[in-house]
Amino acid sequence: MRKLIQETLNLDKDIITSILQNIPGVITVYNIDKNAHRELIYLSPGFEDIVGEKTAAKINNDPNMFFQLIDPDYSDLLENAARKAIKENKILDFKYPVFSDTGKAWIRVQLNWKFLNDNRIIRWFGIISDVTKQVLNEESLIRKREYLHNLIEEASDLIWENDVTGKYLAANKSFLNIMGYKHEEIIGKNSIDFVHPDDKDISIKNFKKALEGNRVSYEVRCISSNNKVLRFWIKLRPVYKEQNLIAIQGIGRDTTERLRAQEIRDITYNITEKLSEIDSLTEFAKIIQQQLSKIMNTENFYLAIYDEQLDRYTFPYYKDTTETIDPNRMYEMHNTITNYVREKAFPILLNSRNQQAFLKKNNISLVGTVAPCWIGAPIMDKSREKAIGVLVAQSYDNPNEYDIEDLRALEFVALNMGRLIIRKMNELKQKNINEQLSLITKILRHDLTNDLVVIKSALNLYNKSGNKMFLKDANDKVIKGIELINQMRDQEDFASANRNLAPYKLQEVLEQVISDYKNCQITVSGKSNIFADQSIFSIFHNIISNAIMHGKADKIDISITHEGKKCLVRITNNGVAIPDDITDKIFDEGFSNRDHSTGMGLYLISKTLENYHGTIFLEENMPSNVCFILIFPKAISR
């Protein structure tokens, strides 16, 4: 029996050796005592295939070299895994790198364990497998995934995934940056909630098509975090796993800028096309405001035009929800944002983030109701490389109403409108001149024709009767005709004078004018500088000659005073009063209550003062106390 057992053991040894040699892996047995001392008991053939012959030879010479092959970065991890296996009474199953002839190899140990010598030693025994290729493939796959992830994250296009209900599962960096949302504000939300109300139907329709297995492309408008309307060209495709639809992947390209550029070009074209239909800068600015409202909020919008000679602004168009401005008045705008934009010839965007710092840095004062969001762009006269005005849009409600794209749009329109505004201003000025010259010609033709008829009739009567009184009548009409021609010449000067204003000293102008009226006592007090042109002499000639000829005045007092930025010229005469029933008509075109008068004098004076940004009115109207007040903007020394 003993002999049989021995033979069986010998046979089993051969069998066991054969089995060990053909196991797909390396068998190992080692002990670890309570002092963490390790001892390799057994390592079956094949380990050299994993680490290489040189490294394996070192282990043959010194078995404990086996433990020194472990990558130091994984020593603690291996030890923790072993403790966990013992604690949970499980097999140790762990992958880690070891040093090899070629650098590093990856092994997987699947080891059982048992306590020896009253738990003072732990014996580990099991199989070591070569998993180098597997790990490298996994690392390669991870790198590829990371590469694809980074590629998606860094893509300029928007990339996202929705579940089959439309909720966002993922969104890349471009999506978040362009839409302006944080990751947690998007994930789990339904994509339809971010679509423009007018485009929801088409979005739902195309999403359903994608759910049916179709690839779809369409254009859609979405709402960003700051309520801006963005435009995208979107492609959707279904994503399957094991033939089951699991998601819808979307790729979107931001076409906002391209479409906005086209819209801006269309707006500029539309404004230019309507230029010939309008008769005033107010109408022109209104068209600009209406066209720009297609791409931005222009509820509060104005056009400011700068008068270089008077150093003041007019506002031909001022649409505002909080205040009104007189379009016929001139405003001093020093130390304002509007003036800053014009002087620097540079567009500005101000909002809650930069407004206070900008105002403080540039010593700028706010005028009127403060708008938390403000954009302004200069209107350029390219021929002089100067800004002639400013286009402005502002919001009182939303501190983030406008962005850099809105500013660029406003700048583009303002830049292209400069030439058109100058052209329209010149057209309107020429139209006004032509209308006045046409009226002057009609008046001259009409009055001279009447006078010539009288002259002809008087000469015929003289020839028949020889009465020299008829010659006197004819001579009076000749003199009147000459006076009329001279008057019309002055009026023509009013209409066609060069309106480039220059500083004039009023006292010098009046000294020259009153020197022509020797038979009237005229006094002048005060002095001032105003902006005017050569027509300023005709203004005072007309007022003084009317007082003397028609009002029978022999005394005229002229006083010059100031009120703020205005110059007031008060002209009082001791002539007859103007009838009360016509005082509200004396500045109307063509009105007169006198025979042989065209009624153009006071009307042209009024129109000329308007060109100076001034005015005239009748202050007193009593016998021996008829007083006109003329108001001029003062000339400012700069």
Image: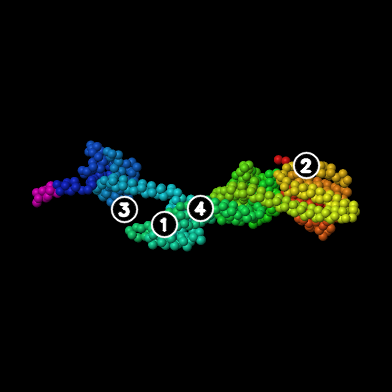
The CA span between labels 2 and 1 is: 76 Å
Residue under the point 29% across and 52% down:
90
Instruction: Tell me, for residue 259, which label it has, or none.
Output: 4
Q: Position of residue 605 (x, y in %)?
A: 77, 50
- Amino acid tagged 2: Lys
Mark nearest the camera among 2 and 3 is 2
Query: Would you say 94 lies left or right of 290 here?
Result: left
Residue 378 part of the magenta segment: no
In the rendered image, which residue does mark 3 sit on?
88
First-in-chain label (1 vs 4): 1
- Chain-order first, disc 4 or disc 3: 3
| Residue nearest the observer in this picture, 306 or 441 | 441
Q: Nearer the viewer, mark 2 or mark 1?
A: 2
Q: Which residue is mark 1?
A: 236
Residue at numbered disc 2: 505
Estimate the spatial distance between the alpha carbons at disc 1 and disc 4, rounded to whole Å: 21 Å
Sequence-first disc among 2 and 3? 3
Is 4 in the magenta? yes
Label 2 or label 4, whichever comes before in sequence order? 4
